Image (cartoon, helix red, strand yellow):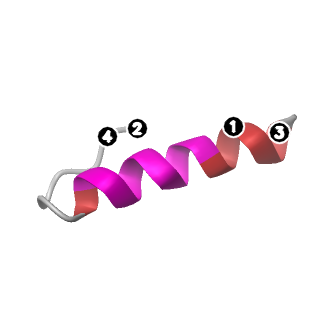
Amino acid sequence: ESLSKERDLHTCCFCRSKQGVCIK
């Protein structure tokens, strides 16, 4: 379950990273 949350954070971060914004 911990990995799932970590992956979710990375996915969100990656998505926002394209726009220069990292959401946690």
**Type of the residue with mark 4:** Ile
Disc 3 packing (10 Å; few <14; some 14–19; many ≥20): few
Q: Residue at the location (38% across, 52% down)? A: 13
- The residue that disc 2 covers is 24
Residue span colored magenta: 8-16
User: Magenta stretch: dominant SS?
Assistant: helix
| In this rendering, position of residue 24 left or right of residue 3 | left
Of mark 2 and mark 1, the one earlier in the sequence is 1
Q: Amino acid at mark 1?
A: Lys
The first of marks 1 and 4 along the sequence is 1
SS at mark 3 in the image: helix
Residue 18: x %, y % from top left: 20, 65
Residue underneath mark 4: 23
x and y, in percent, of residue 11 in the image? 49, 52
Using the rendered view, name the quadrant where residue 19 is placed.
Answer: bottom left
Residue type at mark 3 is: Ser
Q: Residue shown at 69%/37% (left/top)? A: 5
What residue is drawn where x is 59% and y is 42%? 8
Is 13 colored magenta in this rendering?
yes
- Describe the element under mark 1 as helix, strand or loop: helix
Query: The C terminus appears in which quarter of the rendering?
Result: top left
* Residue that carries the numbered disc 3 in the rendered image: 2
Q: Which residue is mark 1?
A: 5
For badge 2, the amino acid type reads Lys
Residues at discs 1 and 3 in contact (Cβ within 8 Å)? yes
Other-residue count near label 2 (Cα within 10 Å), few / some / many at <14 / 14–19 / ≥20: few
Quadrant containing the N terminus is top right
* Marks 1/3: CA–CA distance: 5 Å
Circles 2, 1 touching at the beta carbon (< 8 Å):
no
* Alpha-carbon span between mark 1 and mark 4: 13 Å
